[in-house]
Image: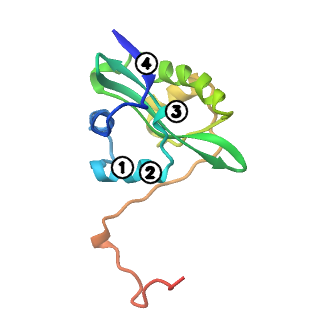
Amino acid sequence: MTNIRSLENVSSESIFSAFKEAFKDYEIQLNKSELKTMLIRRGFVPELSFGAFDGDRLIAFTYNGIGVFSGKKMAYDTGIGTIEEYRGQGLATKIFNYSVPYLKQAGINHYLLEIIQHNFKAVSVYTKVGFEVNREFNYFSESMEKISLNSKGLPSD
C-alpha cells in the first residue's frame, strides 16, 4: 500500500535514489552532485515537495522549487518522476492533487513546469490536471571538453 507525504524528513540519499531509478531510461542523466546542484539552483523546498512511498521506499515524487517568477510567488517543477515498476498507477497525478492544498496554504497560487515535448506520458499527466502549454523552447547540452571559448576569455564583469 502506498502513502503520500511531504519530503521534509526524507534523506538526500532517498531523494537521489528515487530520482536515479525514475530517470534511468531518460535521455538526460544526473549524478548525485549534479542533482544536488540542480535542486539548490531551482529552489527545492522539501517541506513543499511530496512523494508516494511503498513502506519507506520513495517510489514517485514531485520535487518543488519555490520562488518568484513574473512577480508571482509560485512553485516550479524541479523534478517529477515515478520508478518504472510503479508507473501506470496515476501516482504523479495523486501526488500533485495531494500537494495543491499545501502549496495554497503556503501562499502559492501558480505552478510552472517545463517538460520535453516528446515525453508524451508526462504531457498526458499534466494536461489531465489542467496545465496548458504557453511556450516552447529547445535545450542543448555538450560536454565542457568539447566547448572552446574565444581566446580572449569572458569579460571580467
Q: Are marks 2 and 1 in contact (CB under 8 Å)?
A: yes
Who's the residue at 62% across and 38% down the image?
Answer: 133
The quarter of the picture where residue 59 lies is: top left
Task: Estimate the spatial distance between the alpha carbons at disc 3 and disc 2, rounded to whole Å.
Answer: 14 Å
Q: Helix, strand, or loop for circle 2?
A: helix
Residue farthest top in this picture = 1
Labels 2 and 4 touching (C-beta < 8 A): no
Q: Quadrant of the C terminus?
A: bottom right
Say which label, 1 or 3, has the lower sequence index.
1
Give the SS element for disc 3: helix
- Provide the residue designation for mark 2: 40
Percent coordinates x, y for residue 43 in the rendering: 51, 47
Earlier in the chain: of badge 1 and badge 4, it is 4
User: Farthest residue in the right direction?
Assistant: 71
**Crowd around label 1: few <14 · some 14–19 · many ≥20 (10 Å):** some
Q: Which residue is mark 1?
A: 36
Residue 132 occupies quadrant:
top right
Q: Secondary structure at mark 1?
A: helix
Quadrant the N terminus occupies: top left
Identify the residue position indicated by label 4 in the image: 4
Q: Amino acid at mark 3?
A: Leu
SS for dot 4: strand
Q: CA distance from mark 4 to mark 3?
A: 12 Å
Q: Which numbered circle lies on residue 48? A: 3
Given contact means CB atoms under 8 Å apart, are the residues at marks 4 and 3 in contact? no
User: Residue 16 lies in what quarter of the image?
Assistant: top left
Q: Earlier in the sequence, mark 4 or mark 3?
A: 4
Kind of residue indicated by mark 4: Ile
Type of amino acid at the residue the image marks with label 1:
Lys
- In space, the residues marked 1 and 4 are separated at their CA atoms by 23 Å
Residue plotted at (37% across, 26% down) = 60
Which residue occupies the extreme front position in the image?
Answer: 9
